[in-house]
Image (cartoon, rainbow, N blue to C red):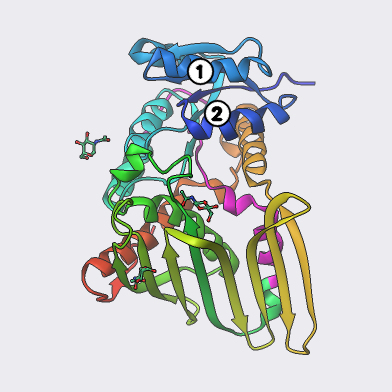
Amino acid sequence: MAKAPQIAIVGAGIFVRTQYIPRLSEISDLVSLKAIWSRSEESARGAVEIAQKFFPGVECKWGDKGFDEIVQDNSILGVAVVLAGQAQVDFSLRLLKAGKHVLQEKPAAASTSELEAALAGYNSISVNVPSKPIWAVAENYRFEPAFVESKKLVAEVGDMMSVQVIIEGSMNSSNPYFSSSWRRNFSGGFILDMGVHFVAGMRMLVGSEVVSVSAATSHVDKTLPPPDNISSLFQLENGCSGVFVVVVSSSSPKILWRVVGLKGTLQVERGKHDGQHGYLVSFYGADGQSKSTFYRFSGVTEEFKSFIHDISQASVKGGVHVAEPRMSFVEGARDVAVLEAMLESGAKQGAPVHVKKF
Ligand SMILES: *[C@@H]1O[C@H](CO)[C@@H](O)[C@H](O)[C@H]1NC(C)=O
Ligand SMILES: *[C@@H]1O[C@H](CO)[C@@H](O)[C@H](O)[C@H]1NC(C)=O
Ligand SMILES: CC(=O)N[C@H]1CO[C@H](CO)[C@@H](O)[C@@H]1O
């Protein structure tokens, strides 16, 4: 059997400690974690201590020197970039230019202008490797079994009449990300960072792109960065319209997508079953019958497996290998473009805004 590919993680924050390391440890037969990098030694050490239990040889890297060592280490095939949203594109491009495959956390970038610059930078890369390195964006919702199954079911609703995305989040002081300084310093606040997930889920369900939006935004909870809620109308390419509502912090959280058609309605709702978090997928038929299935969360693991498969194949087959389209940078860019249009419309008191195409 071929040796498991070696990867590094650039970043050592909450998501690395609570998701990347535990989920990678569950698939340690498929991947080997060679190094963890952070700007500061202390932060890198903290994450390395957690990872050592599962990846005994994991190296601790920090600062400019540590980053260069990762860049120059030819045994590292891919790098996960899990940094502040404002810094990710810059780090990703530096790694890609050095020939590393990159799995970058969402959001793909902070704005459409940054997305355009990022894509131009990526397209200009010509490194001495068999093929261009893969730039994947980690958007676990596209890998959640609930969305994968719902995408198959959605044809059964018939002609689409309405789409509803209702998100009432729980971003209060009990949430580990509440104090995250980069999220507070993001234009669009938590709505952009959280919202890309909900847009990704919606785009996957309907299989059609958002053409234009109109939105109202407001800032009510002053402990949160503005805006903290948004109510948007959107128009899909397939002619159907819908509503997209996000309240960043509510006292009764709810996370729901509904696609209403002539022959039935499909609903995906976040919930818990036997102590496990996941989604309840329900189909309500025109005949009055309904069926529901619960799917546990496993999107983060699935996206890791997909990236590891892609980088292994790319190193064997070179440019012939077609990388998983659900992880492409362009998919991540489309999620950001929808939210940016909604935020822009909100700032213009609901004026219609076209979504930038990627
Ligand atoms: C916030 O963003 C501004 C402008 O992008 C930057 O100058 C500043 O350093 C950032 N602050 C933090 C805490 O990230
Ligand atoms: C934050 O929201 C959660 C979920 O609604 C709730 O259980 C918790 O008590 C809230 N914490 C605060 C400090 O309001
Ligand atoms: C635009 C919008 O939806 N604003 C609402 C934000 O949330 C507060 C509190 O629930 C409402 O009062 C606003 O109308």
Residue 7 position, x and y percent, is: 57, 23
Q: Quadrant of residue 292?
A: bottom right
Return the residue nearer the eye: 101 or 221. 221
Residue 334 position, x and y percent, is: 42, 57
Return the residue nearer the eye: 10 or 30. 10
Q: Residue type at mark 2: give it.
A: Arg
Residue 308 position, x and y percent, is: 64, 32
The relative height of residue 47 versus residue 275 in the rendered view (above or below) is above
Q: Is residue 279 left or right of residue 9?
A: right
**Some atom of ligand 1 lies within 8 Å of the CB belonging to the residue at label 1:** no
Residues at marks 2 and 1 touching, judged by CB atoms closer than 8 Å: yes
Magenta stretch? Answer: 124-153
Q: Is residue 237 left or right of residue 143?
A: left
Residue 17 got which mark? 2
Q: Residue type at mark 1: give it.
A: Gly
Question: What residue is drawn where x is 47% and y is 77%?
Answer: 242
Q: Which residue is mark 1?
A: 46
Q: CA distance from mark 2 to mark 1?
A: 9 Å
Q: Is residue 274 on the magenta stretch?
A: no
